Image: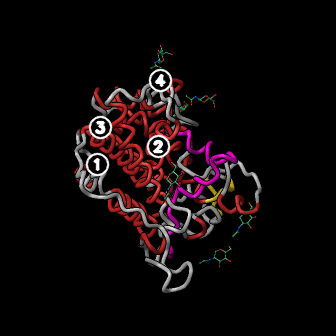
């Protein structure tokens, strides 16, 4: 995968730019546990047969697609680079930060509105076996982006989402983005990677804890905004929620030059990543169930405006 900074120069790096692919798979498997059997059966018609009806298996596709020539347009849909300055101040604003070409917030809105039509066709029996690529891609993107938006450094523009913020983790030189994409959660789960075909004991535990509502933040707050007819509002809520961690922990608890493992930084971050991936899974399951059950306000329009007002001067925006 590519670093954002490296992408600009066309240089291939091995670092990740999203929750690692297996973390996305796990968020998807965890979300599956929240789906009704009816939702599962509808989604199965939308996905290509190779995914065996599993959004967990399909959740990592977006990270390979955006590195193909065909899918390069979706590269920047995985994050929103806010003009924040953690740890001094944190914020995300849609019209300021969602630049032309889109961001994770506009992509969630766009793909949600596409997927809504696909679900209607699947329910009517007009779509089976994942034969409509626009539809299967929309579902795979939703399964992916509702994960990405919970990674604090996917909702922060400082140091290019932490990609250019060098750190040491367990004696290894790396950068902060990669630490949050995988290193902390692997260390927490005591694994070197997660399965990409079934839910891991670690994520199973997180689902059980979510069902018992045993996190410091009640699950009702995670899904306080979960109406697929207001996707911009909800995705902005989720982005602000993630961005707040960059002031509250991600950049504020780093001690100059110390190894993030021996300093206690990694351990202190365990509850945060556990909470964030658990939010991703519950929101994803809830979003898809609501879309399938049509529990949304059909009269409201999906608002898609991602042309920042400053692009062509102060008067050019909307
Ligand atoms: C799981 O990972 C292996 C090794 O990277 C890969 O070959 C396989 O295609 C992946 N399977 C799925 C379902 O993503
Ligand atoms: C919405 O997504 C489709 C691909 O599914 C893409 O062609 C289109 O440009 C996107 N629209 C916006 C406004 O990003
Ligand atoms: C869907 O795929 C299955 C298995 O490949 C096949 O038996 C079935 O006829 C297909 N259905 C349609 C509508 O294409
Ligand atoms: C971070 O490390 C990379 C190489 O690992 C180096 O090229 C870059 O200059 C470093 N950045 C800073 C801000 O020290
Ligand atoms: C982590 O896993 C290794 C190898 O599976 C095991 O030896 C070790 O005891 C585990 N550590 C913890 C804290 O569970
Ligand atoms: C951090 O460490 C570097 C090198 O050890 C030093 O030059 C710099 O002044 C330190 N910064 C702070 C804020 O202590």
Residue under numbered circle 3 = 292
Q: CA distance from mark 3 to mark 4?
A: 19 Å
Looking at the image, can residue 150 be seen? no
Where disc 2 sits, the SS reads: helix
Q: Earlier in the sequence, mark 2 or mark 3?
A: 2
Ligand 1: does it lie within 8 Å of the C-beta at label 4? no
Query: Which quadrant of the view contains residue 304?
Result: bottom left
Label whose residue precedes the other's in the sequence (3 or 1): 1
**Label 2 within 8 A of ligand 2 by Cβ:** yes
**What residue do we see at 52% from left, 44% from top?**
187
Q: Are marks 4 and 1 in contact (CB under 8 Å)?
A: no
Dot 4 crowding, Cα within 10 Å, few <14, some 14–19, many 20+: few
Q: Secondary structure at mark 4?
A: loop
According to the image, label 1 marks what residue?
215
Is 62 a magenta residue? yes
Mark 4, mark 1: which one is toward the viewer? 4
- Magenta-colored span: 59-85
Q: Which mark is residue 138?
A: 2
Give whichever of discs 4 and 2 has the lower sequence position: 4
Q: Is mark 1 within 8 Å of ligand 5?
A: no
Q: Nearer the viewer, mark 3 or mark 4?
A: 3
Q: Which residue is mark 4?
A: 52
In contact (CB < 8 Å): disc 3 and disc 4 = no
Viewer can see residue 173:
yes
236 and 151: which one is in front? 236
Is label 4 or label 2 in front?
2
């Amino acid at each position: 995968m590519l670093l954002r900074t490296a992408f600009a120069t066309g240089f291939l790096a091995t670092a990740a730019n999203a929750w690692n692919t297996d973390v996305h798979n796990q968020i998807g498997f965890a979300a599956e546990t929240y789906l009704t059997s009816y939702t599962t059966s509808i989604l199965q018609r939308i996905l290509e047969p190779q995914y065996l009806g599993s959004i967990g298996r399909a959740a990592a596709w977006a990270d390979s697609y955006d590195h193909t020539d065909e899918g390069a347009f979706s590269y920047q849909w995985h994050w929103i680079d806010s003009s924040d300055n953690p740890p001094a101040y944190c914020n995300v604003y849609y019209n300021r930060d969602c630049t032309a070409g889109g961001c994770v917030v506009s992509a969630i809105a766009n793909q949600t509105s596409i997927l809504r039509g696909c679900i209607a066709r699947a329910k009517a029996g007009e779509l089976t076996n994942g034969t409509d690529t626009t539809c299967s891609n929309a579902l795979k993107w939703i399964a992916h982006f509702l994960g990405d938006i919970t990674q604090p450094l996917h909702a922060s523009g400082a140091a290019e989402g932490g990609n250019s913020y060098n750190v040491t983790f367990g004696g290894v030189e790396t950068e902060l983005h990669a630490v949050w994409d995988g290193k902390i959660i692997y260390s927490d789960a005591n694994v070197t990677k997660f399965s990409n075909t079934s839910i891991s004991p670690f994520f199973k535990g997180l689902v059980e804890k979510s069902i018992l509502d045993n996190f410091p933040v009640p699950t009702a707050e995670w899904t306080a905004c979960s109406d697929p007819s207001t996707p911009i509002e909800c995705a902005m809520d989720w982005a602000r929620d993630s961005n707040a961690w960059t002031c509250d922990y991600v950049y504020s608890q780093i001690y100059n030059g110390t190894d993030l493992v021996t300093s206690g930084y990694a351990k202190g971050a365990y509850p945060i990543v556990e909470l964030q991936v658990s939010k991703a899974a519950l929101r994803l399951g809830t979003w898809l169930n609501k879309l399938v059950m049509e529990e949304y306000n059909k009269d409201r329009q999906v608002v898609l405006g991602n042309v920042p007002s400053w692009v062509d001067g102060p008067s050019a925006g909307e």
